[in-house]
Amino acid sequence: MGLFSFIKNAGVKIFGGKTDAEKAAEAAAEQLRVEAAAAAKLEETIKDLQLEVTDLNVHIDDDKATVTGMAYDQATKEKVVLVVGNSNGIATVDDQMTVEHVEPEAQFHTVVSGDTLGKIAKKYYGNAMKYPVIFEANKPMLKDPDLIYPGQVLRIPHIDA
């Protein structure tokens, strides 16, 4: 008869174990569990920080987070985006939140090595001594004005000159 070729990883498992399709389905289900747990943890963190968002929902799909709900004000909305976005494993945040009390949007600054809140204040406000404005705008995520790190994204609120 001769030699016949077959696909090694297809068909019925007779040696125990799972097919590649079963393994892939289990891996996908585990990924969904991990993402749901991470989303729940982020929602809990946002509530612990006392950021007022009605009907808050965070959904994570791979490295993208989608946030929905109604924030009390623009500052709260931006802080929620920062809490989610400054989390390990999140590359993008799709902000689908609405705002109850509308106010001007802030700018955002990604911290680079050597940055201080004073240097950032000088860049955006022309005055390094305005660093407390940035510190206050990023509370409660920032606990100390000297503890910022490269890659962190900060709110830079609009101020009147």
Image (cartoon, helix red, strand yellow):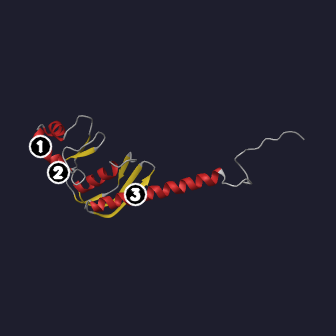
Cα–Cα gap, marks 2 and 3:
26 Å
Q: Which numbered disc, 1 or 2, marks the residue that appears first in the sequence?
A: 1
Asked whether disc 1 touches disc 3, contact meaning CB atoms under 8 Å apart, the reply is no
- Residue 24 position in % (x across, y down): 59, 51
Q: Nearer the viewer, residue 57 or 27?
A: 27
Q: Residues within 10 Å of mark 3 (few under 14, many from 20)?
A: many
Give the tally of numbered discs: 3
Q: Considering the image in quadrants, where does the C terminus appear?
A: top left
Cα–Cα gap, marks 1 and 3:
35 Å
Q: Which numbered disc, 2 or 3, marks the residue that appears first in the sequence?
A: 3
- Residue 66 position in % (x across, y down): 38, 54
The label number, if any, that marks residue 130 in the structure image: 1
Residue under numbered circle 3? 39
Instruction: Name which residue type carries label 3.
Output: Ala
Instruction: Name which residue type carries label 1.
Output: Lys
Establish if 63 lies above or below 118: below
Establish if 45 lies above or below 10: below
Residue under numbered circle 2? 136
Q: Residues within 10 Å of mark 2 (few under 14, many from 20)?
A: some
Q: Which numbered disc, 1 or 3, marks the residue that appears first in the sequence?
A: 3
Q: Secondary structure at mark 3?
A: helix
Q: Residues within 10 Å of mark 1 (few under 14, many from 20)?
A: some
Cα–Cα gap, marks 1 and 2:
10 Å
Instruction: Name which residue type carries label 2.
Output: Glu
Q: Considering the image in quadrants, where does the N terminus appear?
A: top right
Q: Secondary structure at mark 1?
A: helix
Q: Quadrant of residue 119?
A: top left
**Which residue corresponds to the image point at 10% horizontal and 41% vertical from the top-left?**
129
Q: Quadrant of residue 67?
A: bottom left
